[in-house]
Image (tube, rainbow, N blue to C red):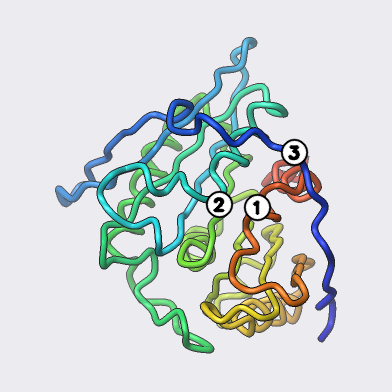
Amino acid sequence: MKKLAMSIAMSATVAMGGIEDRTEARAFTGAGGKTLLYRWAEKKPSDGAKVPLVLFFHGAGERGDDNKAQLRHGVADIVAWLDAHEAGFKFVAGQVPAGKRWVEVDWAANSHSMPAEPSETMGLAIELMDALLADPTIDTNRVYATGISMGGYGTWDIVCRRPEVFAAALPICGGADVTQAARIANIPIWAFHGSKDTAVPVIRSRSMLSALWAAGSDAHYREYPDATHDVWTRTYRDGEVLSWFFAQTKDGG
């Protein structure tokens, strides 16, 4: 398959401790009265410059109502990288309630059609995002989405629903509606999957990347040979990946 190159991730040393202390528990109530629990991290630049906004979408195992479990995978590595390399940033990691999904589709299926409306939790995440984008301190040319597994589906979903917002996306072992590829062909995307994933079929990433390339996208794809479902650990610890991700801007600057 064109561009379906497999590569081994470079590793980077990242401090893992203290992510609960580094983030603040918050709650957002949408227009319909429903509430989204989320963790918030920010770093204010000394010069008052505008900062990027990063949205993280967790996996199925981190659902609940403790407003902590979504920190389990990936968040510490991302925030540590941002702390080390960005003058300032704002970071959001929402939590899906038990029994709900970022995208209400079958993860084991080889394909799906994007629901006409976002799931309840995704709808709240979009409302929160729009509220944050009204903040003049956020650089609207640097809004990023990334997530794992169920959150990989969420990453694809929010980018397809709101393609005008995002500077780049980093979906990990997720899936998307291939008919939406043309809508996001101009967004820098780097997707990741394990070739032996038994939780989310690898065809989900392969087919979406093929659709993107057919639509003229120069999206990147890394498939880890012989890897199963957890490819997020090595991906978020790869300095090359995060450096590329946060170098993307909507205005191309």
Asked whether 208 or 192 is in front, the reply is 192
Q: CA distance from mark 1 to mark 2?
A: 7 Å
Please identify the residue farthest to the bottom as the structure is shown: 110
Amino acid tagged 3: Thr
| Element type at mark 3 | loop
**The C terminus lies in quadrant:** top right
| Element type at mark 1 | strand
Q: Tag 1: Cα neighbours inside 10 Å, few (<14), some, or many (≥20)? A: many
Examine the image and state in which quarter residue 213 appears: bottom right
Q: CA distance from mark 3 to mark 2?
A: 23 Å
Q: Position of residue 206 (x, y in %)?
A: 68, 81
Task: Return the disc, 1 or 3, that comes first in the chain's sequence.
Answer: 3
Q: Is the C-beta separation of discs 1 and 3 under 8 Å?
A: no
Examine the image and state in which quarter residue 2 appears: bottom right
Asked whether 222 or 136 is in front, the reply is 222
Residue depicted at x 54% and y 37%: 53
Residue on which the image places disc 3? 13
Residue depicted at x 83% and y 63%: 8
Residue on which the image places disc 2? 145
| Element type at mark 2 | strand
Asked whether 126 or 18 is in front, the reply is 18
Residue on which the image places disc 1? 168
Taking 154 as reference, is 133 above or below it?
A: above
Q: Position of residue 189 (x, y in %)?
A: 69, 60
